Amino acid sequence: MDAALITRHLTQPCHLVVLDSVDSTNDEVRRRLAAADAGAGAKPPLAVASTRQSAGRGRLGRRWESPEGGLYLSLALAGSGSTLPLVMALGVQQALAAAVPGLGIKWPNDLLCAQGKLCGILVEGPVNDSLIVGIGINIQRPMAGSIPGAAYLSDFNQSAGTEQTCAAVLNATLGYWRRWLQARCSFAPLAEEYRSRMLLCGEPANVRTATGSLVATGHITGIDDEGRLLLEHGGHQQAVAVGEVTLRDHQTGSGFKPAPTTRNNALP
Ligand code: ATP
């Protein structure tokens, strides 16, 4: 990946580091934050990008498959609160929606289209007053072995370049992060935009904890201004701050319900 090419397309200031391969971009950001705290290295906003991870991870200790051909990007960002994952999902969706028809957000922060999962996001920290945001995007299909349930950017836009994608994602996510920071880390000003890009509204779903306990059940109706998922059941509304959503009926296979988006096969 060509760092100069990415930097040329950046409209948002950040210190960018590009590596051929790394264990985990989130871990690399963590190490660089520690160095910055000790007086060496760059201060946030800091970004580390790579096209391969040997130990990529998802939420709840799950593995994020990170073969050559994907984009693995982590950011160290100032701010606090539980809604940064939703803010980041908005940014990635905005960056890629023009290229991927029907790309929408599965609460809280997965990006899906009818073909599957295009992007996963993992927020960790705080570390030295920064939150670490990891973003994994499938761009090219891997040479060997396929990832179950994955969608690929190159299936929609064959010329999708990693550098171009990286710059578009950085510009959009940093832009949303600044808006969130200016609102003192309140999600309320972004909630309506999130609702308009949200998948699965109207679908019957269960929300469970990491250990599988049922937190809520009902039809998804949206999110509130604090970014909590809203479900309606028997005339009652419930708001859920944390959990994993699974659909109760799988009438459409993946349970995917596309959000209305543009159908232009080009990255912005
Ligand atoms: P989900 O909502 O899909 O249950 P999650 O949000 O809890 O997942 P993530 O951290 O986003 O978890 O991603 C981890 C999961 O994503 C893995 O358990 C695996 O099922 C799936 N996965 C792993 N690597 C990839 C990839 N490159 N592309 C698509 N999906 C992947």
Image: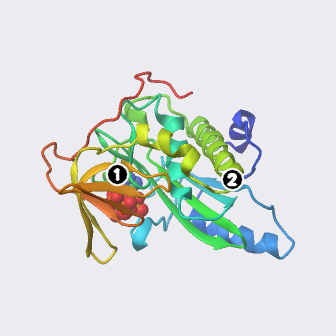
- Residue 199 in the image, given as x and y percentages of width and height: 33, 43
| Outermost residue toward the top in this view | 264
Q: Say whether residue 2 is left or right of residue 258.
A: right
**How would you rate the neighbour count of disc 1 (Cα within 10 Å): few for under 14, some for 14-19, many for 20 or more?**
few
- Residue 187 in the image, given as x and y percentages of width and height: 56, 52
Three-letter amino acid code of the residue under disc 2: Leu
Considering depth in this image, is 99 or 91 the residue closer to the camera?
91
Residue 23 visible in rendering: no
**Between disc 1 and disc 2, whose residue precedes?**
1
Residue 219 visible in rendering: yes
| Outermost residue toward the front in this view | 235
Callout 1 secondary element: loop
In the rendered structure, find residue 103 and report the number of the disc placed on it.
Answer: none
**How would you rate the neighbour count of disc 2 (Cα within 10 Å): few for under 14, some for 14-19, many for 20 or more?**
some
- Residue 133 in the image, given as x and y percentages of width and height: 58, 59
In the image, what residue occupies the spot 21% across and 54% down? 235
In the image, what residue occupies the spot 60% across and 37% down? 168
Considering depth in this image, is 14 or 155 the residue closer to the camera?
14
Three-letter amino acid code of the residue under disc 1: Ala
Q: Are marks 1 and 2 in contact (CB under 8 Å)?
A: no
Q: Which quadrant of the view contains residue 12?
A: top right
Q: On the rendering, which quadrant does ligand 1 occupy? A: bottom left
In the image, what residue occupies the spot 52% across and 54% down? 135
Q: Say whether residue 42 is left or right of residue 268.
A: right
Callout 2 secondary element: helix
In the image, what residue occupies the spot 80% across and 74% down? 37
Q: Which quadrant of the view contains residue 21?
A: bottom right
- Residue 255 in the image, given as x and y percentages of width and height: 21, 46
Q: Say whether residue 221 is left or right of residue 97.
A: left
In the rendered structure, find residue 181 and report the number of the disc placed on it.
Answer: 2
* Residue, disc 1: 144
